[in-house]
Amino acid sequence: MSRIRLLSPTTVNRIAAGEVIERPAAAVKELVENALDAGAGRIAVALDTGGIDRIEVTDDGIGMTPEELTLAVLRHATSKLDDETLVRITTLGFRGEALPSIGAAARLAITSRPRDAAHAAVISVEGGAVTDPAPAAGAPGTRVVVRDLFFATPARRKFLKHPRTEGDHAEAAVRRLALAAPQVAFRLECDGRVCFDLPAQDRAARVAALFGPEAAAALLPLEASRGPYRLSGFICSPAINRATSATQAMTVNDRPVADPVLKTAVRVAYRDVIASNRHAVVALWLDLPPEELDVNVHPAKTELRFRDATAIRSLVIGGIGRALAAGAGTGVPAPALTEHRPALHLAWSRPPAAGGIRALPLPGFPHAAPGAAQAFGVPQDPGFPQGPGLPPAAGLGQAASAVAERQLPLQAGPAARVLPTPQPDPAHPLGAPVAQVLDTYVIAVAADGSLVLVDQHAAHERLTHEAIRAQMLDGGVRSQALLLPAVVDLPGGGVARLLARAPDLARLGLELEAFGPGAVLVRALPAALGAPDPAPLLRDLADELAEFEETTTLEARLDAVIARMACHGSIRAGRRLTQPEMDALLRQMEATPRAATCSHGRPTVLKLSKAEIELLFGRR
């Protein structure tokens, strides 16, 4: 007897189902795509326990006859593929695998009625076993009900995540499809809760409805083309950013995708205007000839291959760059990032015996107070000009005189604030503060003469992080009640994610309550944060929680949540500090573990020894 045998059709279908339907979100995606391909004008999705127990998708599309229902549940039967060369694919589905895969792994019932039919028909598939179609009551269109997903494949079912996590993935899949097809009305219910109910609308209104009011107020339109490729959509200004890439929606030929070429292009386009650990908010539609695109890469059809990926990348980077430069609705290009950037202008005085290095005054910039030069050991010359617009001092070099006479039209900006000469204590490795530069960086001098540079926001973020973490380990974070509770609107499932973990967040000092659909009421914040605006904090926490998997508490990701809170409660770049505040910051850094980096891994302090400084100046 041969050791090689053919598998039964039922087993083959169940194996194939594992590729197409890996979790409830994949089943929801396939069913909604079928509804869109059927020309639906309204689609309603309902989920129970994250889609594990029940998925229901109802549409008002063209419907199916009993004969078509019989074919629809057979593998590789499809009405969408006219060109079997797979060159011009214009529909979302084309493989003919979704319905038989779902029927092989779950209990599937399809009720459908063409618009000109007298009644509907229903067909059932349970673990691969198909019943004959039967007459049924039903409105024009199709209603698909999936129950007990993966009951026939226990190996796959036991690897599903917590229902809340599966529900988040399913909701994200429906949101992507709703963004891709704004001309279709969408309704989503999760365990009886209406997540959103959107009418048919234009792209701008759909993006605003799904991304939230903050993003809606900062949308910049984008239009770009390159040969046969056309890019359109909306991006947000760099000031609106998120902790994750969940609010990056990309559609290619009306197909929602998660393509690495497009994601990399977006990251590169924002690279110079957004922090490396933050993510831009974009909704992009890319249209190109079908023959320029290969969608038959993966059964999930979310990965693509472009014939000319370089041209696509250039189109996205260039289009976003021009949209960012145009400003918010002004139509007037903003200055290039390199224009009018403040620089340090120094001039050597003559004769050399009379001076050292002096700061050359520039119009519009504050000038150092009297005695500031001596604080750095720079001799002062009574004849050196101190006011803007004065002629250059006698003895300055020709190049310096030309700079001073040019009267550059620079904007007033933060200058270096020089403090009285300190006396560094050898017991303090970070030394004593001597200046603050750009209202962001603290300059200190250590007892051994080393130069110390501190990023005040990154450093204070680590201090706040460790303070909250220490309180947490001691039994609970001290909270500060708000005088007036704050109402924060959140898009999507952010409210549900936060409220589901409200007891855990309360241990972190963050007290929340439900406040109608799409909003939460903030009653208290961690005392260590001071008084930050709770809205950005909650948006980032909701995104952070969306990345969680099966954990029902915050223990497994405690540091990530505390880091997010610490970032919002720290002193910001651009805030002027007093000398006692700078000194307190340095002293706390010396006493705090892990203070050499911020919560995101960036350095908080740089220290240059005498030898390193001499090496920079070529003295070694």
Image (cartoon, rainbow, N blue to C red):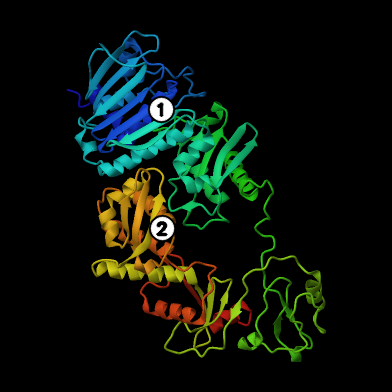
Q: Quadrant of the N terminus?
A: top left
Estimate the x, y position of residue 315 in percent, counting from the top left: 61, 41
Between circles 2 and 1, the one closer to the viewer is 2
**Residue 528 lies in what quarter of the image?**
bottom left
Q: Quadrant of the C terminus?
A: bottom right
Front residue of 390/425: it is 390
- Whether 391 is drawn above or below 567: the answer is below
Q: Residue at x 57, y 84 (%)?
A: 419
Residue matched to label 2: 534
Residue matched to label 1: 33
Looking at the rendered structure, the kind of residue marked 2 is Pro
**Residue 408 lies in what quarter of the image?**
bottom right
Q: Is residue 492 left or right of residue 24?
A: right
Front residue of 80/509: it is 509
- Whether 101 is drawn above or below 482: the answer is above
Residue 309 appears in the rendering: no
Estimate the x, y position of residue 155 in percent, counting from the top left: 21, 37
Farthest residue to the front: give it.
Answer: 484
- Whether 545 is drawn above or below 142: the answer is below
Q: Residue at x 64, y 50 (%)?
A: 325
Q: CA distance from mark 2 to mark 1?
A: 37 Å
Between disc 2 and disc 1, whose residue precedes?
1
Residue 75 appears in the rendering: yes
**Residue 541 lies in what quarter of the image?**
bottom left
Estimate the x, y position of residue 497 in percent, counting from the top left: 32, 48
Q: Is residue 430 left or right of residue 495?
A: right
Looking at the rendered structure, the kind of residue marked 1 is Glu
Q: What secondary structure is marked by label 2?
A: helix
